[in-house]
Amino acid sequence: MSNIKVAILGASGYTGGELLRLLVNHPEVSIEYLTAERHAGKNIAEVFPNLYKVLEMELHPLDPTLLPSDIDFVFLALPHGKSSVFVKDIFERDIKIVDLGADFRISHQNYRKWYGEHPCPELIDEAVYGLPELYREEIAGAKLVANPGCYPLSAILGIAPLLKREVAEADSIIIDSKSGVTGAGRSPSLDLHFCEVNEGMKAYKIGEHRHMPEITEILEKFSGLDVKLQFTPHLIPINRGILSTIYLKLKEKKSTTELLDIYNDMYEDAAFVRVCRENEFPSTSMVRGSNYCDIGVKAFQESNTAIVVSVIDNLVKGASGQAVQNMNLMKGLPESTGIENLPIFP
């Protein structure tokens, strides 16, 4: 019998739909309650046809007072600024929470600078950053977990080992990231029309993307170093996937083999990080539909530099799969429960 009664607030977006795809076959989960502001009253299978005859549930209005009393786990897949309002309403209940939005990922000071006023800043310090490869023990004991952003997750996993071992300079990091269109969400927008996106690639929000402070802040907390970085995101015409190419200055000459040893050592017990063999580099097609992050590394001894390539599926490891991984840890389950599926290939 399933023993985790789950509610998803904001179930009609891409991350909500991916949560449902993963949770519907999770052996310890019972999906009990779904909300979708614009689709309230509809059946979830009307919103996501892939769930037809698999999950038949009515979508409810986004009202925390209607949340059933027996729910013991809530996923929030809402826009920034909205999640925290509902967290404030349900935090005192015997409910554990994973917020897939940005409201609890960064400090109050950074939130105000990049997003505006925070609806409940008093709960920011209660949240644990939901990256098990860095904070597994803290997540296991948390009541509120802030799921990482998709770009930050790919970048942080690619950079953290070299900063933690103080092998790379912390003040000259360059991150070039490319994302599929689902990273922009499901709401209609001219910039996301097929004709606007297809057969093209563009950089956007150069130097002003809201994921910059998240990457910087988490790397600083984890490494204890003063981190300075440049981050440029790009939109590419694929449905899902992120590829981050990261350029780092090394403090001294290192071979590719030595760097790979550092990555393999740090991620030895990480269920969902795969370090590529020497002279092999990952593609988004290698992780599509899965919770894996694949990482390739190459050192250049003549210039004391390194290039790291990190790939994820932005909807799985970059969002919903990561959220389920966090739930598993918070509920005392093996962290891979329900998300062991291999990537889809080709």
Image (cartoon, rainbow, N blue to C red):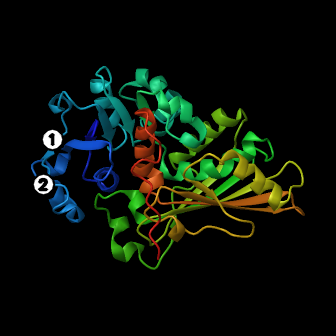
- 174 and 87: which one is in front? 87
Amino acid bearing label 1: Pro
Would residue 82 be visible to someone looking at this image? Answer: no
Nearer the viewer's eye, disc 2 or disc 1? 2
Decide: few, some or many residues near mark 2? Use Cα within 10 Å; few <14, some 14-19, many ≥20. Answer: some
Residue 132 vertical placement versus 339 (above, below): above
Residue designated by label 1: 61
Side of 87 relative to 52 (left or right): right
Label at residue 43: 2
- 15 and 195: which one is in front? 15
Amino acid bearing label 2: Asn
Q: Quadrant of residue 44?
A: bottom left
Label at residue 22: none
Would residue 90 be visible to someone looking at this image? Answer: yes
Residue 325 x, y percent position in the rendering: 45, 44
- How far apart are the two marked residues, 2 and 1, measured between alpha carbons? 13 Å
Decide: few, some or many residues near mark 1? Use Cα within 10 Å; few <14, some 14-19, many ≥20. Answer: some
